[in-house]
């Protein structure tokens, strides 16, 4: 039977959405995930998301990177909330389960506000910071960000002895006034993506931690658009962290 799918994007981070409440798509079929995400021979996407039933919450988000591996995805989380709204599962508020636990979200003035998990550990080294915001992120400043070969330099760090076989996402940052420009190499995609939700969240917290900003609402310029991260600094770390931005429906279709 043809598989109905929907395509969404959040600041250029694009996802295949599948309504899997009837469990017609096998969660073990990672080869199919890879095929669907392939930009030459498939639909093309940075990742694939299954929206499934949950016994107590509004729904479950099952996320796959383009290579079939699983992780948390912030922009994917925002997009699945918009998808749930399109399906009529939610109105303006959502409470759902992801791989890193439950999340809350709400839609206001066309923006999806996704609550991220608290961050209580920040690893600071001489030339980089490491933060896990549901996915691991290596963050470092680079000059002349626009000329950077993100795929080459990101992959070298991702596969280095720093992170072993599991690897890490890599975020390169440059400050622009009170805002920050970010380019990201994403593991699982193994290339630069136009945006990364967990990545810009990690960058915002890192910049506050380093004293580069004293604001509790930070604007991030990703390659695919602007995102806002708001948070509260607590005695143990950061809480009430929200990733805020648009999540847009692109098209729908049937595969094959």
Image (cartoon, grey):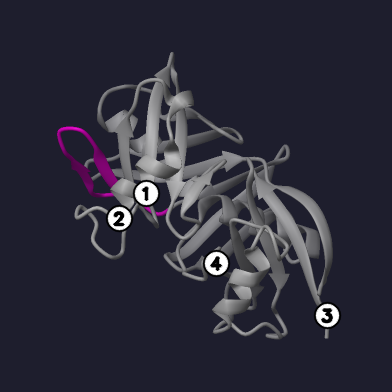
Mark 1 vs mark 3: in front: 1
Q: Which label belongs to residue 159?
A: 2
Q: Are marks 4 and 2 in contact (CB under 8 Å)?
A: no
| Residue 59 visible somewhere in the drawing | no
| Residue 201 against residue 168 in the figure, above or below | above
Q: Which residue is denoted by mark 3 in the rendering? A: 2
* Mark nearer the N terminus (3 vs 2): 3
Q: Is residue 81 left or right of residue 73?
A: right
Q: Image quadrant for the C terminus? A: bottom right
Q: Which residue is denoted by mark 4 in the rendering? A: 63
| Residue 3 against residue 229 in the figure, above or below | below
Q: Name which residue lies at 45% across and 32% down.
A: 182
Q: Are marks 1 and 4 in contact (CB under 8 Å)?
A: no
* Mark nearer the N terminus (1 vs 4): 4
* Mark nearer the N terminus (4 vs 2): 4
C-alpha gap between disc 3 and disc 2: 38 Å
Q: Which residue is denoted by mark 1 in the rendering? A: 155
């Amino acid at each position: 039977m043809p598989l109905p799918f929907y395509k969404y994007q959040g600041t250029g981070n694009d996802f295949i959405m599948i309504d899997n409440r009837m469990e017609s798509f096998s969660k073990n079929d990672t080869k199919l995930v890879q095929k669907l995400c392939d930009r030459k021979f498939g639909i093309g996407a940075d990742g694939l998301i299954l929206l499934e039933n949950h016994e107590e919450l509004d729904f479950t988000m099952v996320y796959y990177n383009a290579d079939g591996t699983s992780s948390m995805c912030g922009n994917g989380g925002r997009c699945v909330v918009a998808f749930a709204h399109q399906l009529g599962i939610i109105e303006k508020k959502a409470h759902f389960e992801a791989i890193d636990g439950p999340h809350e979200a709400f839609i206001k003035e066309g923006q999806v506000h996704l609550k991220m998990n608290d961050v209580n550990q920040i690893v600071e080294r001489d030339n980089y910071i490491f933060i896990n915001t549901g996915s691991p992120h290596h963050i470092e400043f680079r000059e002349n960000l626009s000329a950077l070969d993100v795929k080459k330099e990101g992959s070298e760090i991702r596969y280095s002895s720093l992170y072993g076989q599991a690897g890490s996402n890599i975020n390169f940052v440059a400050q622009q006034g009170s805002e920050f420009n970010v380019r990201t190499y994403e593991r699982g995609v193994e290339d630069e993506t136009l945006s990364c939700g967990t990545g810009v969240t990690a960058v915002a917290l890192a910049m506050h931690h380093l004293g580069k900003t004293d604001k509790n609402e930070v604007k991030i310029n990703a390659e695919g658009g602007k995102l806002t991260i708001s948070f509260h600094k607590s005695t143990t770390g950061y809480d009430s962290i929200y990733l805020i931005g648009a999540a847009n429906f692109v098209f729908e279709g049937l595969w094959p």
